[in-house]
Amino acid sequence: MRRYKNIAMGFAGLALMAISMGASAFSTYNVVFITGLDASPNPFNPDRETSSVSVRTFEYAEWYWLVSSTMVRPTVIVTVAGRPLIANVTAERLDPASFFGIPPVFFFFNQTGEWTHTTTWDGRDLTGTTVTPGPHLALVNVYAGAATMFQSFVWDVQPNIQLALTLTPNAIMPDGTATASVTATDVQGNAVPNYAVRLEATAPQYTTEPCADCGGHSHDGGRPVGRFLDAGGADMGSMTNGATGPAGEALTFSYRADAFGGVDTLRASAFFQPDLFDTQRLTVRVPNLQPLPNSADYVKIGGTPRHLGPPLSVTDNNHYGTATLIAAIQAISAEHRWTFTQLLQINDMSLPQGGGFDISGGWRADIDTPGCRTRGHCTHRFGTNVDVSDLTADGSLVNLFWLEPAVIIRNGIFLDEGNHFHLTFQ
Amino acid sequence: MKPVRLLVLILILAPIALQAADDFEPRNRIDVRIMAKVSFKPKENAFSYRYTIANHKAAKQSVWLLRVSMPDDGLVSGISGPDGWFKPGYTPKGMGWNPALRSLAFVTWASQPPFHIAPGQNEKGFSFTSIASLPGIVDYYAEGYAPPPKFPPGGAPEGPIPGYHDLTPYGPGVVGRTVGPVKPPAPLIPAVFVDYLIGMVEEAVRLGWIQDKEPRHDLLVDLKDAKAALLRGDTKAARKKLKDALDGAHAGKHGGENGKKENDREDRGGGNEERSAEGATLLHYNLRYLIAGLQSPDQD
C-alpha cells in the first residue's frame, strides 16, 4: 500500500511539474521582425491611383512543454501624414515553421510564423486633403503580444504636377546671365509648395556638320556649359537642386552662360520623378552679328577645320561681325581697291554667334589668359574685330600709312599683329 | 647654370620683358600749334576754314595726322589737304570705341613719309568749307608718328590699350582747341546767345586768344549790358551794346597780335572778311550773327 502511495506521489509530482512547465509556456517570450517592406507604386499619383505597402513580419515564440498554443497574429499600423492606416492582413502564416517536418505544435522548443500585411494609402491626410506633393515619411509599427518593431520608409506623393521652366531672357551674351524660374502647379492650377526640382544645363556636342546649335565650332572636346548661381551668387555648378517656396513661389536661379556662343539646353525635372520635366533653349550669342558678304573688293580667308570658312570651306563661320565692322571693312576694301587696284585679304572676324573664338579648338584653354595671349583671338568675340592680312591678294604689302588712317577716320583701332593687322570698330 | 641662379635671372628679366611687351611709344611727342583762319564767302553763304600746323623744333616726332572735331554732323564739305596728305576724310558722329568720339564728327588728314611735318616745320593747306554754321571753339587732335603697337599674331588685347589709346579721349596723340564750325543755337534766343558769347569769351581768354585785360573787361561789360537790355526788352539798347563790342573787335582790340594784323589787312580791302586770330574771328562772326538776328523796329 505504501508502495502505491509512493507511486501516486511520484505521478502527482510529475503532474505538478507538467503544470508548472505548462504555466511557464504561457509566460514565454516572443519577438517580431520586419523582414520586408515594399510600397508600390512609389512614387504614386493620388489623382489617379492609390499606393499599397506590403509589410512582411517574422515572429519567433519560445516555450518549454507540450502546451498547444497559436501564434499571436501581429498587428501592423502604418502612420503617414498624421493618418494611421490599419494594415489589412491578406495572408496569415505564410509558412508555419516546422522542425524536420514535424509540426511545431508537437514540438516543445519554439514556434515561428511569417506574415504579410498590406494596406493602401490614397495620398490624403486626415481631413481628406491631398498632401503636399513630395516625399512623406511613413512609419510602420508592428505589435505582436508584448513584442514590437518599427521601421520607416519614404512614401512619395506625386499628383498631376505641371513643371514650367521660364528663362528671362531666352537669349544672352556669352558670359551673360539669365534668370531660370521653375514653377510647379497641380491640376487645379495651384502653385505647389516645397516641390523638389533638379535643374540641369547641357550644351550640344559636335558630331557632324551642320551643327546648328554649335555656334560655328566644328570641333568637339566638351563644349563648356554655363553655371547656376544661387541668390548670393555662389556657383552651384551646371546641375543643382532646389524646391519651390513654402507658398509655392517659383524656384529661381541665375544662370551664367559660358564664354562661347551656341545654344544651351536647360532642363527642370521633378527631383523624385525625373520623367516629369520641362526644357528650354537658351541662345548664347552676341546679338545682331551679320555675315560679311562675298565681294569683289576683298578676299575672305582664315577658315580651318575647327571653324569652317573660306578658302577651306564654302561654309563661312569665321566672318561674322557687327554692322559697323562690316560697313568699315566694305568701305576700306572698296577704297583700297579703287586706290591700289588690289584686294585686301580679310581674315578672322567672329563666329556666327560670337563668343570665344578658340582658334586651336581647345575651348577654355584657348581663350583664358594666358592661353589667349599665346593662342590668340582674345578679341574676336563680339564681332568688332577683324584681322587683315599684311599682304594683298596678289602678294603685295599693304600700305600701312594708307590703312591706318583709313581705320582712324572711322574711329577704329589699328594694331599690328606681326603677319597681319588687327582692326577694331566699335 | 645652377637652378638658384637661373631663378634669380628669371626674376630679374621677367618684369623687364613684360614691361617691354606692354610699353608702346605714345604719339604725343610733338609740340604742335594750330592756327586757324576763317573767312566768310557771302556768295556761297559759307565759311572757309584753313589751318596751319607748326611742329616746334623741340618735338621728338613728326606730325602725321590731324583731326578737327565738331559737335554736329553735316557741317563740312570740300575737304582738302596739302600735298602728301592724301587721306582727308570726314567721320560722322556715332562711331568709335570711346563715347567722347561717338559724340563728335571729325575731319581727318593723314600723311605718309616724307610728308610728315618734321620738328621745326610747318604745313598749311588743311581746309574745308562749312555752311549752316558759325565759328566756335572745338578740339583738334594731332598725332606724331610712332609705329602702331605690335603684338604676336592673335595677341592683341580687347579694345583700346589702357595707358595708350586713352592718353586723350581721341587716342595716343595730343589734343588742343581751335576754331571750327558749330551749329548756331536754334531757335535763336538773344539773351541765351549772349550767355553763349560770354562763355566763349571766357574760354578764349583762358586759351590766350584774348590777352589784354582792359579790352576783355570792356567786352564783357558790353555783353552783360546787352543781356540786361534784352532781358528788359530794350532791343535797341542791346543792339547798341553789341555793336560797341563788334566795333571793339573790328578795331583789333580783342584779337591779340595776329588778330590785329589780319584785321588791318581785311580793313585795307579784299572780297572776303577775314580774321585769323581765333579770338577776333569768334567775336566778329558771332556778334554779327546775333546783331542780324535781333528784331528791332529801328533796325539799321
Image: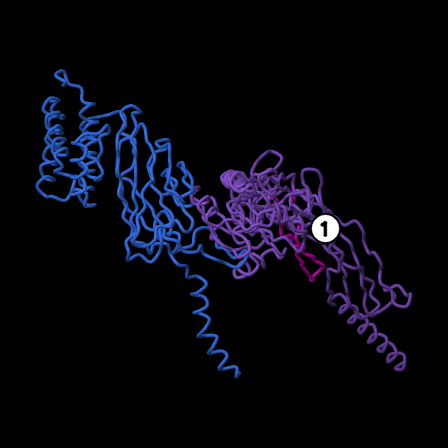
Chain colours: A purple, B blue
Q: Is residue A150 magenta?
A: yes
Q: Position of residue B192 (x, y in %)?
A: 20, 30
Is residue A358 or residue B49 the one in the foreground?
A: B49
Residue A405 image-quadrant placement:
top left
**Count of picture labels:** 1
Q: Is residue B66 left or right of residue A235?
A: left
| Quadrant showing the N terminus of chain A | bottom right
Span highlighted in magenta in the image: A132-158
* Vertical order, A61 against A124 (above or below): below
For mark 1, give the secondary structure. strand
Is residue B202 or residue B58 the one in the foreground?
A: B58
Which residue carries the number 1 mark? A39
Is residue B13 or residue B291 the one in the foreground?
A: B291
Characterize the magenta stretch by its predominant secondary structure: strand
Please report the residue visible at 18 percent of the width from the left and 22 percent of the height from the top.
Answer: B294
- Farthest residue in the bottom direction? B2
**Local crowd at mark 1 within 10 Å, few (<14), some, or many (≥20)?**
many
Q: Position of residue A215 (x, y in %)?
A: 62, 45
Residue A341 image-quadrant placement:
top right
Give amino acid for label 1. Ala
Q: Which subunit holds the residue at mark 1? A: A
Q: Position of residue A169 (x, y in %)?
A: 53, 40
- Farthest residue in the right direction? A101
Q: Is residue B236 left or right of residue A332?
A: left
